[in-house]
Image (tube, rainbow, N blue to C red):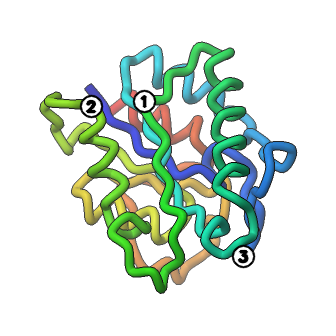
Amino acid sequence: MKIIFLDRDGVINKYPGDGRYVTKWSEFKFLKGVKLALKRLTQNDCKIFIISNQAGVSKGIFTKKDLDDITENMLKELNRSKIKIAGVFYCIHREEDKCSCRKPKIGLLKNAIRSLGKIKIDKKNCFFIGDTYRDIQTGEAFGCKTILVFSGKEKKNNKNFPLKADFTASDLLEATDLILNS
């Protein structure tokens, strides 16, 4: 069984821009190819988790209820396409809160794995897909393979990226091909 950890903004939905947040459902826009990618992962019995920092809640930019509404609508939309998401885990803390769940710390990934019960996990079959350096750090810290996608914050031409991902892909659909062929 493959375990797929996905960042949200810039991987599943349109990246809102540096320092900006998706604050309500009407601002959430699925990226092209995302539903097809997630459907393929579902059909191949992958366990898919969404792992995302959403500090806008603790900063007072939007509420926990707003975040829950976005998540509920996202999951309804994915469910209509017969996509199974095993869980959605958010850190709503700010960096200065020093919590154990804010990426690049691995608390959210541990919680996701715990939610599976007593299933034996082989980290060689775990992938973290993200669009930022922090996402790649998180995947490495957890011990899984990392895929940097260029559909969000980072762009292919960034020569100063301080960490090398195991793989790079233009978007989630291309990352899905890498996973299913590995």
Amino acid type of disc 3? Gly
Q: Within the image, what quadrant is residue 139 found in?
A: bottom left
Question: Residue at 21% across / 30% down in the picture?
Answer: 117
Q: Is residue 76 left or right of residue 46?
A: right
Dot in front, 3 or 2: 2
Task: Determine which residue is flagged by label 2.
Answer: 116
Question: Residue at 46% across / 25% down in the picture?
Answer: 41
In the rendered structure, find residue 143 and report the number of the disc placed on it: none
Q: Earlier in the sequence, mark 3 or mark 2?
A: 3
Q: Is residue 58 left or right of residue 181?
A: right
On the image, the x and y values in percent for residue 124 come to: 20, 42
Amino acid type of disc 2? Leu
In the rendered structure, find residue 86 and report the number of the disc placed on it: 1
The local crowd at label 3, few if under 14, some if 14 to 19, many if 20 or more residues have their Cα within 10 Å, is few
Task: Say which of 101 and 63 sits in front.
Answer: 63
On the image, the x and y values in percent for residue 170 come to: 61, 49
Q: Earlier in the sequence, mark 3 or mark 1?
A: 3
